[in-house]
Amino acid sequence: MKRISEINPLGEERANPDEETRKKLRVERLQREKDEGYQMLVELCNLGEYDMAEQLANRNFNWRYEIVDGVVIERID
């Protein structure tokens, strides 16, 4: 157990990750968001909500998906 004088009242400082770690974390976060977006779009299409799925895909252009004939496909640029 630490003595009171040894405890930092502001808490431990968070280490700043280097640029490579930040890039890796950003890529992982974007991929996770894309995967979750795909699942939402598929669920909407399965429910017959094609217009809503298309709107969601258009609002989240970075997911790179589009709805064609009620099917979620990856957008080709």
Image: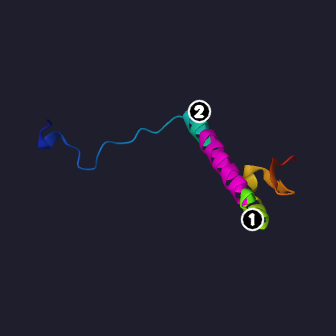
**Stretch of the chain drawn in magenta:** 27-44
Tell me how far mark 1 sits from mark 2, CA to CA. Answer: 40 Å
Tag 1: Cα neighbours inside 10 Å, few (<14), some, or many (≥20)? Answer: some
Which residue is under mark 2? 20
**Secondary structure state at the residue bearing disc 2:** helix
Residue 28 percent location from the top left of the image: 61, 39
Residue wearing tag 1: 49
Q: Secondary structure at mark 1?
A: loop
Q: Position of residue 12 (x, y in %)?
A: 31, 42
Q: Position of residue 44 (x, y in %)?
A: 71, 60
The relative height of residue 8 versus residue 50 in the rendered view (above or below) is above
- Is residue 77 shown above or below 20? below
> Of the residues tagged 1 and 2, which is closer to the observer?
1
77 or 22: nearer the viewer? 77
Q: Nearer the viewer, residue 58 or 43?
A: 43
Quadrant where the N terminus is found in the figure: top left
Residue at the spot x=59%, y=32% of the render?
20
Ranked by sequence position, the earlier of labels 1 and 2 is 2
How many numbered badges does the structure rendering display?
2
Residue kind at label 1, given as amino acid type: Glu
Relative horizontal placement of residue 18, taking residue 59 as reference (left or right): left
| 38 magenta-colored | yes
Residue 52 visible at all: yes
